[in-house]
Amino acid sequence: MPATSQSMKLRTMNVAVRTGSKASKHFRTMAALPGGEAALALAPGLPPTPAQNLVHHGGKTIQDLTFTNFYIGGAPAWKASDMQSIDRALSAAMADQQLNNVMMQYFKNKPISSKFKPSQVLPGTKPAAVSQGDVEGLVSTLYAQGALEGFDLASTVFNFMLPSGTVLNTDEGPTPAVKAVNAAARNPVHPEQDADSLNGLGGYHGSVHVSAKVTIYYAVGAFSEQLPDGNENGIVAFDLPWKNVAATFYHELNEARTDPDVEDAIKAGSDPKGAKFLGWVSRHGDECGDFPMSEAGGNLNLIMKEVMLTDGSGTVPVQFQYSNAVKGPEGPIPAPHPLHKHK
């Protein structure tokens, strides 16, 4: 997760951001590997290039992934149909063979799997804003309450879905009980405040060390939609908000499975030893979902698409992930690429 101090901190990307947004500029300015130099933002429309290929840095990956969805804000904050659509689309997309054929190259073409466990609506009221500190506090609370029992924590990602109207930010501390979230009220003296869903942030993933031996992986995302005032909250690419949510979490889950311990690398700051925590990350500090967003620029329809499932049962909204084999974002393919093409 990002730091919110005013001092410049270089860090690996672990966020989904809309290209050209304030959030994108905020994180792109800092994008780098631990101990590396800041990477330059790429102009939209650049063709695929080997310079963006992902490199395995020796860190953990998750070949057989389990995930579940926690819906924040209580039942009144959610339409049952939206939750059902998100659950169905995300579980189908993550288990789809032709989509997984792209990601298998990062596991030496060994089969990968994703298992979805039934979602839950968390009790409470809809929050105005949710920070990194809020999410990590909630993770620790759920663990302490025994709500995460029955999951293999080493291979599970817990998705936290924010309801319509809630603003996601990357503040490391908990959100005060009363907090202004009006985009027009931003203080230019504190540019870190632009790293929120009113300014292009869609979601991010990370981890919490609840003890010396227990790590919990999570992802969190905004309910990406066009607001009544015409502005966007999150990343809007599809005709219905639930599709934006599903595509954002498809991005986050694929990054979490190929680079789950990125949080430890970020916390290492400029220490080159932090790179050992990284899984598949480019030399520019991008994870598998990041460069496709940057390359698409304002043309999100190039990489955020509804694709037919392998079994022909319907379509799912996804974001194309970076593929070393084609040196750019790639949609579903009938078979994995030969490994020699990945070099």
Image (cartoon, rainbow, N blue to C red):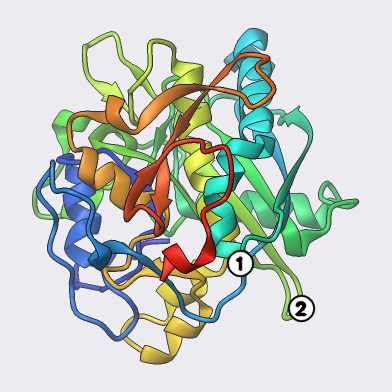
State which quarter of the image contains the C terminus: bottom left
Q: Residue furthest right?
A: 150
174 or 212: nearer the eye?
Answer: 212
Q: Position of residue 277 (x, y in %)?
A: 52, 79
**Amino acid type indicated by mark 2:** Lys
Side of 177 where 77 appears, left or right: right
Q: Position of residue 1 (x, y in %)?
A: 43, 61
Q: Quadrant of residue 342?
A: bottom left
Q: Which mark is residue 213?
A: 2
Side of 274 where 219 appears, left or right: right
Q: Position of residue 63 (x, y in %)?
A: 69, 60
Secondary structure of the residue carrying tag 1 is: loop
Q: Alpha carbon of mark 1 to alpha carbon of mark 2: how far?
A: 28 Å
**At 39% from the left edge and 59% from the top edge, which residue is drawn?**
324
**Amino acid type indicated by mark 1:** Lys
The residue identified by callout 1 is 108
Labelled pair 1, 2 in contact (Cβ < 8 Å): no
Measured along the vertical axis of the image, is residue 17 above or below residue 170? above
83 or 54: nearer the eye?
Answer: 54
Q: Which mark is residue 338?
A: none
Side of 242 where 200 appears, left or right: left
Measured along the vertical axis of the image, is residue 56 above or below residue 220? below
Q: How many numbered dots are placed on residues in this image?
A: 2
Measured along the vertical axis of the image, is residue 124 above or below residue 226? below
Q: Return the disc, 1 or 2, that comes first in the chain's sequence.
A: 1
For disc 1, the neighbor class at 10 Å (few under 14, some 14 to 19, many from 20) is few
**At 76% from the left edge and 30% from the top edge, which residue is drawn?**
120
Res 22 visible: yes
**At 44% from the left edge and 28% from the top edge, which residue is drawn?**
166
For disc 2, the neighbor class at 10 Å (few under 14, some 14 to 19, many from 20) is few
Q: Position of residue 267 (x, y in %)?
A: 43, 76
